[in-house]
Image (tube, rainbow, N blue to C red):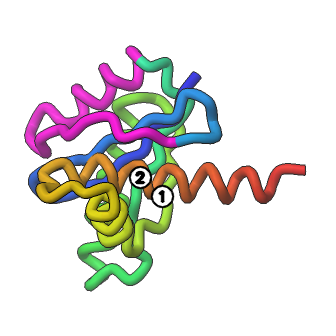
Amino acid sequence: MSLIGIDYGGKRIGVAVSESGTLASPHSIIANDARLLARLDALGRELEAEMFIVGIPRRAKSAAGEAKFKRFAEELRQKTCKPVVLWDETLSSVEAEQRLRELGRKTIDDIDMYAAAVILQSYLDDRARRSP
């Protein structure tokens, strides 16, 4: 069983995976188009996903912006029949970019999947802190 983290964007979706339940790894980038939910459903089945963790900005610019993330999460839950957790993604892209630059990466075209890994790792770390 694995967990799938998602950095939801208007054009691209970053995807990260944790098969161990302790460490998140960048996985892929998926176009945000009409086939998005089908692709995520297929990925979830392929990886035997237990649940999806979707990043949502805690300081959404508007109620409509926040509703967009919640609507996506609900559509994903309905399509996959898997639990979907909304998780604070604040500054995940900034953190991912900083880490990539520290590693000497000059181009960050795949920033979205690294941001998804930051989101998923934050969730995993919080879950570990709460476990007895």
- The picture places residue 26, in percent across and down from the top left corner, at 36, 40
Is residue 113 part of the magenta span, yes or no? no
At label 2, which amino acid type do we have?
Val
User: Mark 2 or mark 1: which comes first in sequence?
Assistant: 2
Q: Is residue 88 above or below residue 123?
A: below
At label 1, which amino acid type do we have?
Leu
Q: Which residue is mark 1?
A: 86
Answer with left or right where residue 7 lies relative to residue 125: left
Q: Which residue is mark 2?
A: 54
Answer with left or right where residue 129 lies relative to residue 24: right
Residue at position x 23%, y 27% from top?
Answer: 39
Point out the residue furthest to the front here. 104
Residue at position x 39%, y 36% from top?
Answer: 78
Name the foreground residue: 119 vs 68.
119
Q: Is residue 55 above or below residue 73?
A: below
Category of crowding for the residue at label 2, using alpha-carbon neighbours closer than 10 angstroms: few (below 14), some (14–19), many (at least 20): many
Is residue 26 part of the magenta span, yes or no? yes
Q: Are marks 2 and 1 in contact (CB under 8 Å)?
A: yes
Q: Tell me the quadrant of the picture where the N terminus can be found.
A: top right
Point out the residue furthest to the right here. 132
- The picture places residue 92, in percent across and down from the top left corner, at 38, 66
Looking at the rendered structure, the secondary structure element under dot 1 is strand
Answer with left or right where residue 68 lies relative to residue 59: left
- The picture places residue 106, in percent across and down from the top left corner, at 14, 59
Q: Is residue 113 above or below residue 118?
A: above
Label 2 to label 1: alpha-carbon separation: 5 Å
Looking at the rendered structure, the secondary structure element under dot 2 is strand
Magenta segment: 24-46
Point out the residue furthest to the top here. 46
Q: Quadrant of residue 50?
A: top right
Name the foreground residue: 126 vs 66.
126
Which circle marks residue 62 in the picture? Answer: none
